Amino acid sequence: MSRLFCAFFLCLLLPAVQAEDLPKVELGIGFAAQHLRDYRGADESQTQALPFPILIYRGDRFQADKDGIRGLFLEGEGWELNFSAEAALNGGSDENTVRAGMESLDSAVEFGPSLNFNLTGEDFDHGWSLRLPLRAVFAVDLTDKNIEPIGFNANPKITYRKPALWRGWNSKVDLGLLWGSDDYHDYYYSVAPAMVTAERTAYDAAAGYSGSYFKFSLKKRRGQLWYGWNLRYDNLSAAVFDDSPLAVTPHYFSTTLAVGWFFWSSD
């Protein structure tokens, strides 16, 4: 996948600091290293290291922070409806053995609404919440400057946030399920007749269940410095594409370690 696009994704996930009277805009630069499989279902992995920009924007209705870029449409007592954008990272597939001869997988960006419910905390930054995002997904090829729609996915999840878990580290846990449209699964797991080999049979992916996942994150802000680490595990057992020749393993792991420095903020 494009390292530039990966860097853009990482900058959107950086956290806003939980404190009063913060600047509306902050800019910075960071460096991240990540280890991940080529795509969900692959048994081959890679490690990447890259610089990335940092953007924090704390508007009343539009924000860019730890939850990505989002706009708040509606809100009430214990609930909100927002529109958000995120990236769906895969490690790339240029050298993946089971995809030999097939087109490489581009990075993808997701846009769509999310209905969120605060279950236990004083707000969405504390305690348990239920999030119900539904997003359209687009494959992004920066080399050819092409954006292609590849379907939809749904990602209901339970989130737990614990600010100041230990010595200033903020923690977050996500437990989620994934569903995808047939076009979305086609992109990653279908094998056209022209791509059939002795080891790779034809396959037409269907819409349906895409697996479950667990993600744990730690983030800390200290002055102008920011630190972050996350670990994600996906289980693809019983996914509708588990018999695809491209889905080699039901286990998916990824981890990212990052550090950032803020060099400018608005008054």
Image: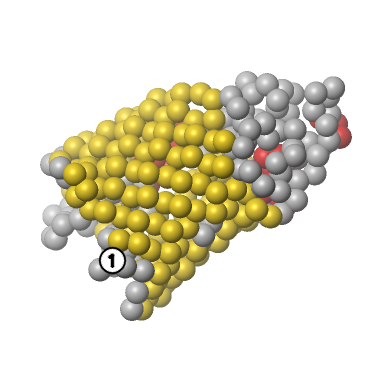
Q: Indicate the position of residue 63 as horizontal and vertical percent values.
A: 33, 59
Residue at horizontal 30%, vertical 61%? 127
Residue at horizontal 57%, vertical 53%? 178
Is 10 on the left-hand or right-hand side of 42? left
Taking the image as drawn, is residue 246 in sight? yes
Residue at horizontal 57%, vertical 30%? 38
- According to the picture, the residue beneath numbered tag 1 turns out to be 121
Q: Indicate the position of residue 61 as horizontal and vertical percent values.
A: 34, 67
| Quarter the N terminus occupies | top right
| Quarter the C terminus occupies | bottom left
Taking the image as drawn, is residue 82 in sight? no
Scheme of colours in the image: secondary structure
Number of callouts in the render? 1
Residue at horizontal 32%, vertical 45%? 14
Q: Is residue 158 above or below residue 216?
A: below
Q: Indicate the position of residue 195 as horizontal and vertical percent values.
A: 81, 30
Which of these two is toward me, 146 or 249? 249
Question: Label 1 is placed on what type of residue?
Answer: Gly
Q: Indicate the position of residue 87 as horizontal and vertical percent values.
A: 49, 46
Q: Is residue 190 above or below residue 21?
A: above
Is 136 on the left-hand or right-hand side of 18? right
What secondary structure is found at the residue carrying circle 1? Answer: loop
Q: 10 Å neighbourhood of mark 1: few (<14), some, or many (≥20)?
A: some
Query: In the current view of this chain or complex, which residue is farthest to the front?
Result: 237
